[in-house]
Image (cartoon, rainbow, N blue to C red):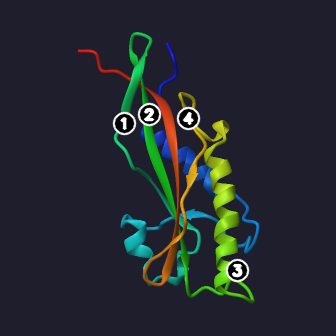
Amino acid sequence: MATTTTLEAIRDSLITALRAITPASLAQEKFDRSPTRTPLRSWATGDSSCLRKFEIVPTSTPEPVGVHGASETRLHQELTVTIAYPASFVYGDQDIDDMRDVIDADARKVRDALFTGANYPAGAEPVSEPIVGLPDEGEGVWFQEITVLVQRLESMTLG
């Protein structure tokens, strides 16, 4: 019987992996999960403490890609990590250029963490290299999104 896992276990493992990243700049400001149950984009708007706060959410429905054994199914599902960067934060001498540099460097580190199989629980792994989108500017805050396609084995309910 193969090891199965859940979306919640994958999310929790990725939260741990992202919190362990040491940023290339402003290293004292670590990555951390958004502190509220409100969606990140709603909470971060207007909150200067949102630097490197993130959320991990499924952005597709689980897609069955085959049965694995008698009681497990193989699923593919996209997860998106969204990271917030307050526009009011001082990033360096060139502010907006430096902010883009910080976001770009962070995106590379997060992409690498999402593509490292050891950052997933047994029964799950990334299927392809994560896709890094262009940062978009919200109201007083920038958001970086990185999407990864994850494969997991899930127990089937046989009734």
Which element carries disc 4, helix, strand or loop?
loop
Residue bearing mark 1: 62
* Residue 98 - label: 3
Which element carries disc 3, helix, strand or loop?
helix
**CA neighbours of label 1 inside 10 A, class few (<14), some (14 to 19), many (20+):** some
User: At 34% from the left edge and 41% from the top edge, which residue is drawn?
Assistant: 61
Residue bearing mark 4: 127
Q: Nearer the viewer, mark 1 or mark 3?
A: 3
Of callouts 4 and 1, the N-terminal one: 1
Residue 20, visible in the rendered structure: no
Answer with left or right where residue 31 lies relative to residue 11: right
Which element carries disc 2, helix, strand or loop?
strand
User: At 46% from the left edge and 47% from the top edge, which residue is drawn?
Assistant: 79
Q: Are marks 4 and 1 in contact (CB under 8 Å)?
A: no
Residue bearing mark 2: 76
Residue that protrudes farthest toward the top in the picture: 70
Quarter of the image for the C terminus: give it. Answer: top left
Q: Do the residues labelled 4 and 2 touch (CB within 8 Å)?
A: yes
User: At 56% from the left edge and 51% from the top edge, which residue is drawn?
Assistant: 131
